[in-house]
Every structure is written in C-alpha cells, then in structure tokens.
Amino acid sequence: MSSNFETEFKRVRHIQYFVKCLKTLPSKHAALDTNRLTMVHFAVQSLEIVGFFDSQENLKTYSISKEEIIEWIYSLQVISSPQSPPTSAGFIGGSFLGLNVDGEYYNQGHLAMTYSALCTLITLGDDLKRVHRNEIISALKYLQLNDGSFQCVGLGSEYDLRFVYCACAICHILEDWSGVDQHAMIQYIYSCKTYDGALSLVPGQECHGGSTYCGIASLALMGALDQSFYHFNGWKDDLIRWCVSRQIEGMQGRPNKLEDTCYSYWIGATLKILDCENYLDRDVLRCFVMACQSDLGGFSKVRDEYHPPDLLHSFYSLAWLSFSQQELNPIDCMLGMSRRHFLSFRKKK
C-alpha cells in the first residue's frame, strides 16, 4: 500500500500548489482578505504534511522564508493599549486595516485568527515568546457569553461551537485556562447534542460533521470526554454510529448529502479522538480522497475532474491522509496542526 500510495500521490504538484497559494492566491479569494491568516495556516500545515520544510533545498528552490512568514504573522498581532477594548487582544486575519494600528476600536483580535496564528507559528518553529499571552487569555473572559459559548470578536458577532473549539485550542496551546469558564463551555456543548448522538453548531439545529468535531475535540482538550460519556449513558455508541454512517465511499457531512473531502477529516478525526478510526473502511475512503486529487496539485471537494482544487479541501484531505500514511507527517487530531512540531514546542518549554 505504501509504495502504491507514493506512486499515486502527486507530491511535487502539491508542493507547487501550496507554495503558489502561500505567495499569490487566485482572484476569487479576494473576498477572504480578512481571513488571510487562515489561508496561510492551511498552506503551511499542508506543506508540513508533505515534508516540504524538511529540506532546506526546498526553501531555497521555492524562495520561501519561514522567518518572513513568522514576522508577517506577528505584524497581525493586536497591541493593546489602555484605551483598547478588553476584547482586543489576539491576531487579526490580514492587513486590511494597516499593520500595528494601536488602540483602534475596530482593530480587534479574532478567535479563529488567533488559533491559526498560534498553530502556524509553532509549525514554523517559533517559540511564541512574542505572543501577548496574558492579554489573549484575559480577552477570552470577555468573549465568552453567558450560555458558555464564545463570540469571535468583541464587536458583537456570531457565536457557536466553532469558537468554543478555538478558545479551547488557544487555552491548551498556551497552557492557561484561567480566562474561561470550562463548566459553562461543557454545558453549552451538551446543549448542542442532538437526538442521534452528534452535535449541531448551536442548540436546536441539525447536527453536522464539522460542529461534531468541534464539540468532541473541545471536550477532549478540556479532559472532559470520558466524564461526558459517563454522564450521558449510550452517547458514545450513538456518536460512533452516526459518524460511521456518514461513509458512502467518501464522507458526507450530514445525512442525505453528497460526499465531500473535508469531512474525511472532520469525521475521521472525531473517530480518531474516540479511538474508533478503524471502524471506517479506510481503503475505500482513501480511494475517494485520492480520486479528488487534482493534476494541478491540491484536492477538490468532490470527485469531478472539472471541479478545481481549493485550499480548505486540499488541507483537510491531506490532514486525513496524514493519519494513515507513513509517508506523510501527521496532524494532531485535536489541534489540527503539525503533531511533531507541537510536541517539540512543549518539550522546549
């Protein structure tokens, strides 16, 4: 299987695709300017998975400087002042307001961008010593709402399990949970539990593969997964059944939906957290994901030669493949970032 995978896997094309995305995104991505940091996160993690950063020759050949990327990320860190709102600390997603704008009301950190920044910095070998840890943790206190959920910015925004997960990941990476009410977070996750064992983004809505991952990974990061399954007798079995039932060949995000490569990760990683990844037919799933591989590099969301690749589906396709292919550097299934670099970061502390 390994030799066949290496023959079928378009490693050089993928490197070229992600390097291109790291340098210049297509014009259709212009609307994502405020999320540019997440795009960098996807590209850097993907290049790490395929082993790009293992070779100094690669960096030289493709003119990639890890130091320049690190400095660009730090330029997006919001520097709080006494006049800044208490929610302002963290990272913004791009330079759309200009860089290092102090004390601006609308220049506030975003939970998802802060998560992306920390993951990317660690993967590039940074020690996070320039991260304003205390301010970020303090901001979480003001971003958490009364029901236990989190808004992503302090200006008033959507709030759901995505940002609960981002808050958990930030606290886990920085090893500081003092800024959040974990009991309220856990209760909010419980409120998103649906009759069939999965989780919805907000209470009362349909369950979904992405929101299920966010909730289960959050409970695991808080060390509350086992107690949750003990509290709700039968929940774990229902959850596993729901996840496994999403496989057609690839994975669907909800019942009666089409297969989509990103759910290979969302649901595959959920089962990996539960130590039940082997319940899937991984060979069939691998064939589906590989069939979505583009000759241009990257992966599309569906098995269609006319459907172009995109960064999100390319990263999550590789993230799932990294669980089972020894030729790839694995992703941490709870953090969505390089496992080896996170372990190295922890050891150096």
Image (cartoon, rainbow, N blue to C red):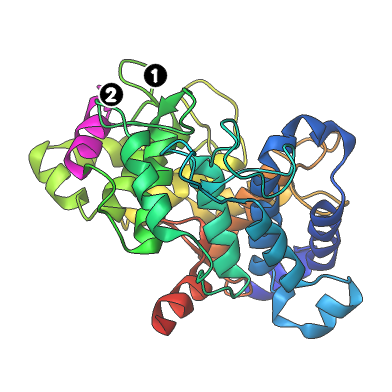
Upstream in sequence: badge 1 or badge 2: 2
Q: Horizontally, is 160 left or right of 79 in the view?
A: left
Residue at image location 80% in from the left, 63% down from the top:
10
CA gap, disc 1 and disc 2: 7 Å
Q: Position of residue 133 (x, y in %)?
A: 42, 59
Query: Quadrant of residue 243 in the image?
Result: top left
> Are the residues flagged by discs 1 and 2 in contact, CB closer than 8 Å?
yes
Three-letter amino acid code of the residue under disc 2: Thr
Q: Secondary structure at mark 1?
A: loop
Where does the C terminus fall, quadrant-wise?
bottom left
Residue 228: image tag: none
Q: Is residue 290 magenta?
A: no
Q: Magenta residues, as a range?
A: 182-198
- Which residue is denoted by mark 1 in the rendering? 206
Q: Horizontally, is 88 left or right of 326 in the view?
A: left
Residue extending farthest to the top is 204
Near-viewer residue (102 or 336): 102
- Which residue is denoted by mark 2 in the rendering? 194
Residue at image location 79% in from the left, 55% down from the top:
22
Near-viewer residue (39 or 289): 39
Near-viewer residue (17 or 24): 24
Residue at image location 80% in from the left, 64% down from the top:
15
Quick check: 330 above or below 265? below
Task: Inspect this view and state whether residue 316 appears.
Answer: yes
